[in-house]
Image: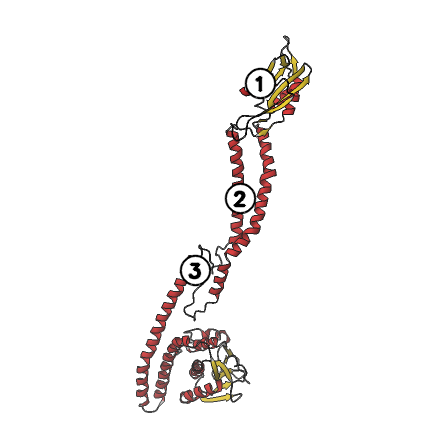
Amino acid sequence: MSATADHYCLRSKLTWRLVMLQAALLFAVIALVVGTLWAGGLPILERDEDRVMDVVRGSLGRDGNGGLALRPTAELKQLRDETPDLWFLVRDRQGQTLSEGKVPDAFTKIGGALDDISQARLGWQMFEDDPRKSPARMKRVDTEIGNVQIITATQGRLSGIRALFAASLTFFAVTLPGLLLMAAVTFFATPMVIRRAFAGIDTTAEEARRIDFRQHGSRLSADHLPLEVAPLVTAVNDALKRLDDGYSRHQRFVADAAHELRTPIAILNTRLESLPAGPDKIRLLEDSARLATLAEQLLDIQRFDQCRHPFVRVDLVAVAQTVAADLAPLAIAAGYELSLDTASDRTETLGDRAALERALTNLVQNAIQHGGRRGTITIHIGSAATIDVTDDGDGIPPSERNRIFDPFYRLTSLDRGAGLGLNMVREIARLHGGHVAVLDRSNGGACFRLALPPAPFVQ
């Protein structure tokens, strides 16, 4: 995985985007409502009609002809400045009227009909009549010039300052608390929703982590997955199927090639046996044996799929005796002594006997090839289900002890081996739940230890 991969947390990203979307929608709704009211001329401000009436009452007077007049008081000037759409209608007991602003026609002629009414509210039904018609209030008040009737609006348009104040009040009283509440709910609910929605993804990811490349036919479950993720799982399953098909074709090719090699190798061995004894014959027999080993190792690749549970009880002492008997002639011909040492008469593990024989055979053949053609090759079976193969050669450098188990890896470029034997040993060890390692020897040489789980004790 690249160190610069751009990963992000879907839960965090989705939560913040939802909060921003909610904020945008909330502001848009408020702006739309206020804008619609403003553009449509609808009354959107509750007016303090008592203040209007008090200011008008304090400003009323008589002109030189005895008619109604307004004195230019500071309160009246301020009221006019704050209320651009101000209107009112004043009527005294003598029927004289005084008006300011655009008085609705419906209120200009009803004053006389309300002379015996001290106060009243006048208006229309909200949804059945024109909502742009502003309601009004009528009240009779005593002034310096006598008792008069005043009619004024109870609602009106917002001025610039009042609009700013109303917008600020709406934001802090409605928008901000609503946004904070929605954000809190979003931060709490979104992770829960995502966690529940992605529970199937976690299960599928765990299935993917458990896939063993040696196990063919593995597929990811598409149950309980979001529809958006299902195509990805389907694509992965299709890729796994293609890999299985390719691996099967590869296995068939390897098995067929190995089988085809067996016949010419057998013919070659027969012809080599008929040669006169001598160093050249020994070398050729060793090369032929390595070639036969390579063919068997190629077949081992195909056999791995057959070494599956349930395993049976296998006696490692018997396995070692068989391998020692088979390889003793080859070891002696190469200049070695072959020794078998066991800690007990019987040491058991659970596994596949044929696979374990191949693993031990590869370790002994590796010792024959790299042991320096001198000394003793020893097979030791420990009581804890361990197999040690040691030689008196030059040993394995510590820096190479992990790499020698990689396929096709060779210690030197002149090494005539195929580089598959030790890799096969490691794979067979893993298949049986064990491991193989190179150990240090005090007197030099190499020591390979194949450690396997001991078979459970049976009474």
Mark number, residue 22: 2
- Left or right: 280 as drawn, with respect to 156: left
- Residue bearing mark 1: 110
Residue in the picture at 57% in, 46% down: 183
Residue 397: x and y in percent read 49, 77
Residue 18: x and y in percent read 52, 47
SS at mark 3?
A: helix
- Comparing 288 with 252, the one in front is 252
Residue in the picture at 45% in, 89% down: 337
Residue type at mark 2? Gln
Sequence-earlier tag: 3 or 1: 1
Residue 331 shows in the view: no
The residues bearing labels 1 and 2 have C-alpha atoms spaced at a distance of 50 Å
Residue 258 shows in the view: yes
Between circles 1 and 2, the one closer to the viewer is 1
Sequence-earlier tag: 2 or 3: 2
Sequence-earlier tag: 1 or 2: 2
Residue type at mark 3? Val
- Residue bearing mark 3: 233
Splitting the image into 4 quarters, where does residue 415 fall? Answer: bottom left
Mark 2 nearby-residue class (10 Å; few <14, some 14–19, many ≥20): some
The residues bearing labels 2 and 3 have C-alpha atoms spaced at a distance of 33 Å
